[in-house]
């Protein structure tokens, strides 16, 4: 399966963030988005995930059975965690498991070291623990494309390493990862795009 | 369908855990209806004549208090984005959330109404009809309210704007809700005609409001 992006242009607030951006990503490939603040990394990810309207260009996925649209093929982890503070850690994941739908939550709980916190309301977690809970959604439902926007914010070094292993495992298993990040994730990315050069963003 | 039900269940669980929304709505309903006789004086005939109208207006205002929560919390914490990437279209997500809002707010308010009817000396034969009309009318309250909630999602202090947008849209529900109760008490108009129009309003809003909400949510997710 391929993710094909052609001639993408993004205009936000009257400013062109990027123009004529094209790339293609095959299964098992990863892409790192770089660029200064405001260069359009988040906008690009949101366009790919289908939240933002396209100004021009196309985004498509080929080689998918029964024409599922990209939204159902991808996970988007943005600045917000999507965690309900009044539900427990286990209830949060169980909801995603039945909604997305996923298979089971135990792997996700184990890999993100959330097993001991399973019965604690998510509102009592620290910022890093909440982030882990937000990321755990990636493992609850198996989807080929991961869009990650600064995924390791507020994670400690141990969790960052575990997360890097998960990303590599996902790529190794034929998934795709597009990550916007300033800090090195500890993952070897095959491709890289630097935004902001043509747009005259703050250097 | 499984996903739809799991979303409804989650919203009900959340409103139960958070508790505040329905508590506030019920408390507000009680207070508004309770202070009215204090302002109008102890004229039982007057009270029983205006009871259906007062109960309906207060119910709309009370429901309005919790309508903005339909989407707001999920929008703030990023859950709405993840929901949008699920298997349900935004229309179905909206419908599930409105259904949960109706169950958690519309039904409790409806069941409180006859108790408050006692305070207003509501005519004895009107109690059953009052509950019936409210049961039929409150889904429209949730679904139409959700349009306002979706439109004002990104705004800070959107609550007041929400009331301005939504209350005018509640007018038909109010008119036909009250007139079907009044028809039973005093006549001469027909109960059936008003009641059927109320049913039609409710069904139309259940079908059309999710389309409007989905369009508004799509804009707010940009």
Image (cartoon, coloured by chain):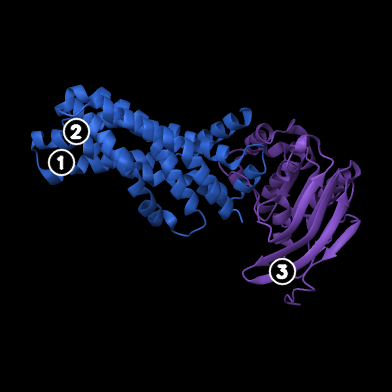
Residue at 71% from the left image edge and 61% from the top image edge: A56
Q: Colour of chain A?
A: purple
A10 on left or right of B115: right
Whole-percent x and y of residue B167?
34, 48
Sooner in the amino-acid sequence: mark 2 or mark 1: 1
Residue at 52% from the left image edge and 43% from the top image edge: B211
Q: Is residue B166 above or below residue A107?
A: below
**Dot 2: chain letter:** B
Residue at which label 2 appears: B119
CA–CA distance in space, label 2 to label 3: 63 Å
B101 on left or right of A90: left
Q: Which mark is residue B37?
A: 1
Q: Are marks 2 and 3 in contact (CB under 8 Å)?
A: no
Whole-percent x and y of residue B133?
31, 29
The crowding category of the residue bearing disc 3, from other C-alpha atoms within 10 Å (few below 14, some 14 to 19, many at least 20), is many
Whole-percent x and y of residue A130?
67, 48
**Dot 1: chain letter:** B
The chain drawn blue is chain what?
B
Quadrant of res B27: top left
Q: Indicate the secondary structure of the residue bearing disc 1.
A: helix
Residue at which label 3 appears: A17
The crowding category of the residue bearing disc 2, from other C-alpha atoms within 10 Å (few below 14, some 14 to 19, many at least 20), is some
CA–CA distance in space, label 2 to label 1: 8 Å
Residue at 78% from the left image edge and 35% from the top image edge: A107
Name the mark nearer the viewer: 2 or 3.
Answer: 3
């Amino acid at each position: 399966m391929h993710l094909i992006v052609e001639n993408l242009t993004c205009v936000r607030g009257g400013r062109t963030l990027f123009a004529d951006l094209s790339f293609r990503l095959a299964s098992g490939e990863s892409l790192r988005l770089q660029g200064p603040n405001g260069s359009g990394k988040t906008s690009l990810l949101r366009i790919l995930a289908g939240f933002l309207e396209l100004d021009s260009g196309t985004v498509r996925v080929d080689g998918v059975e029964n024409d599922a649209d990209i939204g159902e093929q991808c996970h988007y982890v943005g600045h917000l965690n999507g965690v309900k503070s009044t539900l427990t850690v286990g209830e949060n994941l169980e909801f995603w498991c039945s909604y997305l739908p996923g298979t089971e939550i135990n792997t996700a709980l184990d890999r993100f070291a959330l097993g001991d916190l399973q019965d604690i309301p998510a509102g009592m977690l620290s910022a890093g623990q909440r982030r882990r809970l937000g990321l755990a959604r990636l493992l609850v439902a198996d989807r080929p494309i991961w869009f990650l926007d600064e995924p390791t914010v507020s994670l400690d070094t141990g969790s960052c390493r575990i997360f890097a292993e998960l990303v590599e495992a996902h790529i190794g298993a034929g998934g795709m990862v597009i990550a916007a990040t300033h800090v090195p994730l500890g993952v070897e990315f095959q491709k890289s795009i630097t935004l902001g050069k043509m747009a005259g963003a703050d250097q | 369908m499984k996903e739809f039900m799991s979303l409804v269940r989650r919203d009900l669980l959340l409103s139960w855990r958070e508790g505040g929304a329905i508590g506030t709505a019920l408390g507000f309903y009680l207070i508004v209806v309770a202070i009215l006789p204090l302002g109008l004086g102890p004229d039982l005939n007057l009270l029983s004549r205006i009871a259906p109208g007062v109960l309906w207006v207060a119910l709309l205002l009370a429901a309005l208090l919790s309508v903005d929560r339909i989407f707001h919390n999920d929008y703030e914490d990023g859950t709405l984005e993840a929901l949008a990437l699920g298997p349900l279209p935004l229309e179905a997500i909206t419908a599930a959330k409105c259904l949960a809002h109706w169950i958690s707010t519309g039904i409790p308010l409806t069941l409180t109404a006859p108790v408050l009817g006692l305070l207003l000396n509501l005519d004895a034969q009107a109690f059953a009809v009052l509950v019936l009309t409210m049961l039929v009318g409150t889904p429209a309250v949730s679904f139409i309210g959700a349009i306002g909630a979706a439109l004002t999602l990104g705004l800070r202090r959107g609550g007041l704007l929400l009331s301005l947008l939504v209350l005018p849209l509640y007018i038909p529900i109010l008119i036909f809700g009250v007139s079907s109760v009044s028809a039973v008490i005093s006549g001469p108009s027909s109960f059936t005609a008003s009641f059927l129009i109320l049913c039609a309003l409710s069904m139309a809003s259940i079908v059309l409001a999710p389309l409007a909400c989905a369009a508004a949510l799509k804009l707010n997710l940009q």
